Image: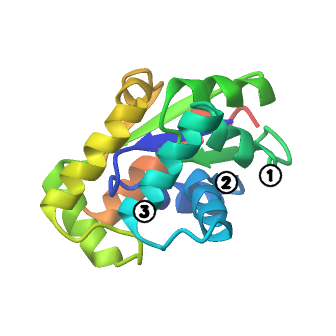
């Protein structure tokens, strides 16, 4: 099982696209958060969804989003889970697999903001101030620890094609030969 982490806009979704094209099953913790937020009448807005996610963590434990996402795991083989934000979530997913590997995606803040503005998701931030606020929120949840504990890191500071190459190489060299 591969856990993908990184700050907002770093390129986690693009890594998952590459993994999916190579036959990996993918689960997105952010989708789980948005599904639950929608069920609870939370507006599709970054701050509102972030507050909801934090509130649920406070009520039910730091691994609540891992527990809710794990309900969708079909197999631990060739599974990529996107969006782990803290060590408790990592630990929870380790119950489902003999081998958990963390891949961190890194891009600088300016590049991440440019990418976020281009992707234009309804719940995305719209300014550097908003990104700083979101970064701080995610850092408060422990994402920095997950990134620091990563088994692999891909720097996503060049073209999308180069990032895809780096992602494919990592997946082939370290995961597909084991499958």
Residue depth check, mark 3 versus mark 2: number of the one nearer the observer: 3
Instruction: Point out which mark residue 72 bears.
Output: 1
Seen in the picture, residue 5 relative to 50 is either above or below; the reply is: above
Number of residues whose C-alpha sits closer than 10 Å to that of mark 2, classed few (under 14), some (14–19) or many (20 or more): some
Q: CA distance from mark 1 to mark 3?
A: 25 Å
The image shows residue 152 at horizontal and vertical percentages of: 44, 30
Asked if the residue under mark 1 is in contact with the one under mark 2, i.e. CB atoms within 8 Å, the reply is: yes
Does residue 63 appear in the picture of this structure? Answer: yes
Instruction: Point out which mark residue 27 bears.
Output: 2
Seen in the picture, residue 94 relative to 5 is either above or below; the reply is: above
Mark 1 or mark 2, which is nearer the start of the sequence?
2
Number of residues whose C-alpha sits closer than 10 Å to that of mark 1, classed few (under 14), some (14–19) or many (20 or more): few
The image shows residue 116 at horizontal and vertical percentages of: 29, 67
Mark 3 or mark 1, which is nearer the start of the sequence?
3
Residue depicted at 76% across the width and 37% down the height: 179
Asked if the residue under mark 3 is in contact with the one under mark 1, i.e. CB atoms within 8 Å, the reply is: no
């Amino acid at each position: 099982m591969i856990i993908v982490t990184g700050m907002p806009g770093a390129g986690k979704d693009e890594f998952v696209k590459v993994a999916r094209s190579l036959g990996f099953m993918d689960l997105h913790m952010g989708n789980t958060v948005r599904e639950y937020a929608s069920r609870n009448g939370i507006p599709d807005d970054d701050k509102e969804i972030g507050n909801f996610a934090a509130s649920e963590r406070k009520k039910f434990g730091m691994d609540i989003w891992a527990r809710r996402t794990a309900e969708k795991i079909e197999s631990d083989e060739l599974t990529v889970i996107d969006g782990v934000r803290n060590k408790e979530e990592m630990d929870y997913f380790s119950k489902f697999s003999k081998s958990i590997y963390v891949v961190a995606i890194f891009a600088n803040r300016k590049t991440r903001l440019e990418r976020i503005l281009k992707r234009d998701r309804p719940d995305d931030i719209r300014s550097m101030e908003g990104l700083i606020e979101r970064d701080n929120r995610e850092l408060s949840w422990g994402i920095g620890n997950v990134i620091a504990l990563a088994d692999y890191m891909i720097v996503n500071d060049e073209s999308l094609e180069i990032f895809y190459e780096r992602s494919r190489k990592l997946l082939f060299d370290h995961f597909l030969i084991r499958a």
